[in-house]
Every structure is written in structure tokens, then in C-alpha cells.
Amino acid sequence: MFINLQELILSFDFKDGLDDFVQLQYVTFPYLKVLKFLDECPKAEMLMKFLELNGKNLKELYVGNNNNSLNLSISRFCPNLEKLSTVFMDSEIETLKIILNNCKHLKGINVWCGDEYLNEKKLLQIIAKYSPKNFRELEMYYIYDVQLEVLPEELEEFFTNWKNRQPQQSLSIIIIKNYDDCISLEVNRDNMKIIEKYLEIGLVKKFKTKIMHCYDDDYNFNK
């Protein structure tokens, strides 16, 4: 069954077809590099079994459901990940630390922010302190109309810590919003001055914001 498969992209709408994963969870794909779920994900237990068999060689993993046990299994079974998109609750910040410590080849991560999800300030602190040496891209996805704000001194502290990392990497920051009026770190004018300063000296490689409404064709950020 497609023994040489390197990329597996699955789309399950509203849990229809998820039963198809019952058998797939036991199949080994020795060359699988990319696993992506565009919509609903299988039950955590099934996906964890699949990762136990196939996670070692994965370079990219995209899941859109929150499950702390699943995230812990990613840290255990997927040590060679370079790109990860997953969901953490704000109370699961320690799990994010574990992933950053165990997935030492990680270059980029997409996480949800706001409300019950990760807090911007804590996220930046964790990324600066715990992300692996080749880490270079942070995507923050605001799914709700949240009113968060990172203060300029907190953002400056983040970039100072990032600048002192060895080896030094230029960082790309991408902010994805579900609502036009979400207040994220770039809304503060002083924050943008700080970002522009570090863009000029090359510490920030790219800074981008985009709006993705639920009715957009490309609404799912895993696509």
C-alpha cells in the first residue's frame, strides 16, 4: 500500500470519513516526510499510534485539534520535525517547552494565540529561551476576536534575547487573524518601530500579517 509514500494530506469534514483512519493507523510508511490534516483530525489515540509507527522520519506535521497527550506524543515520536502546526491551550505551555527541547531540528511552528490558547507574552518568552538552534519562523494564529497586546518593553526584551542566541538566526514572524480588529503585537505603534528596527539590521527576516475569515477559501491555515 503506497510503501514509498512521502507526503500524506487528508481532509475529513466534520468527522465524516474519520473511520477510514482506523486501519490506516497501523500502516507503516517508512519514507513518509509530510503529514497534513486539512480539517478534522482522527481520534488522538489513533493518530498517536500512527505517529509511533511513522513519526521518526516526519519533517512536517500539521494538525488542527488540541490534545495534550497527542502533543506529548509528537515530542516523543517525531524527533526530526522541521515544521509543526498544532494547538496548545494556555495551560499546556510546558508541553510546548518539551516539544522545543525534544524536536531539535525544528525550524518553524504555527500555534494558536488568545483566549484559552497561548498568551503572546509567554509564547515569545518560551520561543526565545527554548527553541532549537535552527528555529527561524513563528506563526501566531488568532482564531478569536481577542484583545491581547505585547508591551514594547516586552517585545524589546524578546528581540534582545533572540539576538544573544548562538548561533544567531534571522527570525520570520507571521501573524494570522480571524478578525480585522484583533489586537495583536503589531497594532501598537511602538512595537512596529521595534520590529522595523530589527528588520533593518536583519535580525527579523520577515514580518507579515494577514486576515483569514472563516468564509475564505483558504481559511484553514494548514492548506
Image (cartoon, rainbow, N blue to C red):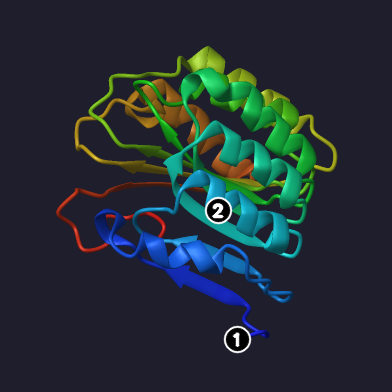
Q: Nearer the viewer, residue 208 or 215?
A: 215
Q: Residue type at mark 1?
A: Phe
* Residue 148 location (% of width, % of height): 35, 19
Mark sitting on residue 111: none
Direction left: furthest residue: 215
For residue 34, side relative to residue 56 (left or right)? left
* Residue 97 location (% of width, % of height): 69, 29
Q: Quadrant of residue 82?
A: bottom right
Q: Nearer the viewer, residue 101 or 203?
A: 101
Mark 2 vs mark 1: which is more N-terminal?
1
* Residue 37 location (% of width, % of height): 44, 60
When the figure is inspected, residue 218 is found, relative to residue 140, above or below; the finding is below
Residue 81 visible, this orientation = no
Q: Residue type at mark 2?
A: Leu
Query: Residue sitting at 57 percent across and 62 percent down?
Result: 25
Query: Residue sitting at 78 percent across and 40 percent down?
Result: 102
Q: What is the CA distance from the residue labelled 2 to the residue labelled 1?
A: 19 Å
Direction right: furthest residue: 166
Mark sitting on residue 2: 1
Q: Please state, as top left, top right, bottom left or bottom right, where the C terminus lies in the image.
A: bottom left
Residue 187 visible, this orientation = yes
Query: Residue sitting at 51 percent across and 55 percent down?
Result: 62
Query: Residue sitting at 21 percent across and 37 percent down?
Result: 179
Q: Quick one: SS at disc 2?
A: helix
Q: Quick one: SS at disc 1?
A: loop
Q: Quadrant of residue 49?
A: bottom right
Give the residue pinned by disc 2.
47
For residue 77, side relative to residue 43 (left or right)? right
The local crowd at label 1, few if under 14, some if 14 to 19, many if 20 or more residues have their Cα within 10 Å, is few
When the figure is inspected, residue 120 is found, relative to residue 71, above or below; the finding is above
Q: Quadrant of residue 31?
A: bottom right
